[in-house]
Image: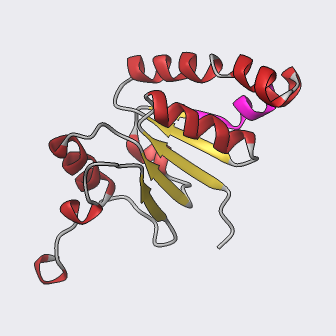
Amino acid sequence: MNYKNIMIAGCGVLGSQIAFQTAYKGFHVFVYDINDEAIERAKDRISNLKPYYKEDLWVTEEDLNTAYARISFSSDLSTAFAEADFVIEAIPEVVQIKTDFYTELGKLPPEKTIFATNSSTLLPSQFAKPDFLQE
């Protein structure tokens, strides 16, 4: 599959780093977070990564601006997800938050979409119904 559009769900510290690195590598990134306030914090967090790229990777301001321009932000899950080829979930490690997120996301996906989680303490299988319980 030719992945072009990547959705990052959750743009805290780790999600923002994943989003910017993904955009820096040439992908179009759709950032989703729970509300407009969280989106504004995400924009600031990602912008604050630019000096580190300049210092550590000797990247030009133009390269950084081009990467940032590849990122779209939305607090509307269906908007953020509409074109996603690949979803990276980086939301808080709270069972109810993840359950609610996957329940909503499960109503939206195009068949082509691949899902990945950045969870380090929870198993993805905790959020999937067994086949015999699927409607």
Is residue 36 in view? yes
Left or right: 126, with 20 as reference point: left
Which quarter of the figure has residue 97? top left
Q: Position of residue 110 (x, y in %)?
A: 46, 66
Q: Position of residue 11 (x, y in %)?
A: 46, 32
Which quarter of the figure has residue 106? bottom left
Residue 46 vertical placement versus 116 (above, below): above
Q: Which residue extends farthest front?
A: 56
Asked whether 7 or 57 is in front, the reply is 57
Residue at the spot x=64%, y=35% of the render? 20
Asked whether 125 or 86 is in front, the reply is 125
Q: In this picture, which residue range is highlighted in magenta?
A: 65-72
Left or right: 120, with 21 as reference point: left
Q: How is the image coloured?
A: secondary structure
The number of callouts visible is 0
Residue 106 vertical placement versus 66 (above, below): below
Residue at the spot x=37%, y=58% of the render? 108
Instruction: Inspect the magenta stretch and tell me whether residue 67 lies in it.
Output: yes
Residue at the spot x=39%, y=43% of the render? 77
Q: Position of residue 116 (x, y in %)?
A: 44, 58
Q: Which residue extends farthest bottom?
A: 132
Which quarter of the figure has residue 48? top right
Asked whether 71 or 59 is in front, the reply is 59
Left or right: 83, with 91 as reference point: right
Q: Which residue extends farthest left?
A: 133
Is residue 135 in view? no
Magenta part, dominant SS: helix
Residue 12 vertical placement versus 23 (above, below): above
